[in-house]
């Protein structure tokens, strides 16, 4: 069972390294909207405010490490 977890972790790491290569390591709300397939700005802000996607408010906007958005996507695919 531990071997399966290790394999899954390795596959997830490879996937994370290849996802959204064209984006910077830190993304804004507009980038996240595209990553989540054009969800609303309000929904993205709610995900950040509630901590489901960790991020920081900078001025009037939010900045989020891209890896947190990718982890959110992968976790929600597993739960779907």
Image (cartoon, rainbow, N blue to C red):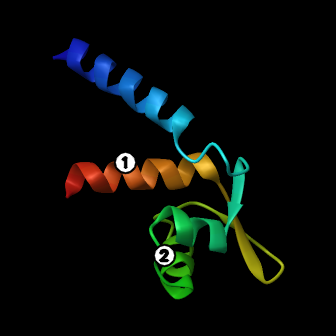
Q: Secondary structure at mark 2?
A: loop
Quadrant housing residue 28: bottom right
Left or right, 27 with respect to 38, comes to: right
Residue tagged by mark 1? 74
The percent coordinates of residue 60 (x first, y second) are 79, 84
> Crowding at label 2, few (<14), some or many (≥20) Cα neighbours within 10 Å?
few
Q: Secondary structure at mark 1?
A: helix
The percent coordinates of residue 59 (x first, y second) are 84, 79
Residue at the image position 46 percent from the left and 66 percent from the top: 36
Left or right, 49 with respect to 80, comes to: right
Of label 2 and label 1, which has the lower sequence position? 2
Left or right, 9 with respect to 33, comes to: left
Residue at the image position 73 percent from the left and 50 percent from the top: 24
Furthest-right residue in view?
Answer: 59
Front one among 45 and 28: 28
Label number found at residue 38: 2
Furthest-top residue in view?
Answer: 3
The percent coordinates of residue 71 (x first, y second) are 45, 48
Residues at marks 2 and 1, CA–CA distance in whole angstroms? 17 Å
Asked if 16 appears above or below 56 in the picture, the reply is above
The percent coordinates of residue 37 (x first, y second) are 45, 69
Residue at the image position 64 percent from the left and 63 percent from the top: 55
């Amino acid at each position: 069972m531990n071997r399966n977890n290790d394999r899954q972790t390795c596959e997830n790491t490879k996937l994370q390294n290849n996802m959204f290569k064209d984006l910077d390591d830190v993304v804004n709300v507009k980038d996240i909207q595209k990553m989540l397939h054009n969800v609303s700005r309000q929904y993205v802000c709610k995900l950040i405010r509630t901590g489901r996607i960790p991020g920081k408010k900078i001025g009037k906007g939010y900045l989020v490490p891209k890896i947190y958005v990718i982890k959110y996507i992968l976790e929600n695919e597993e739960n779907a």
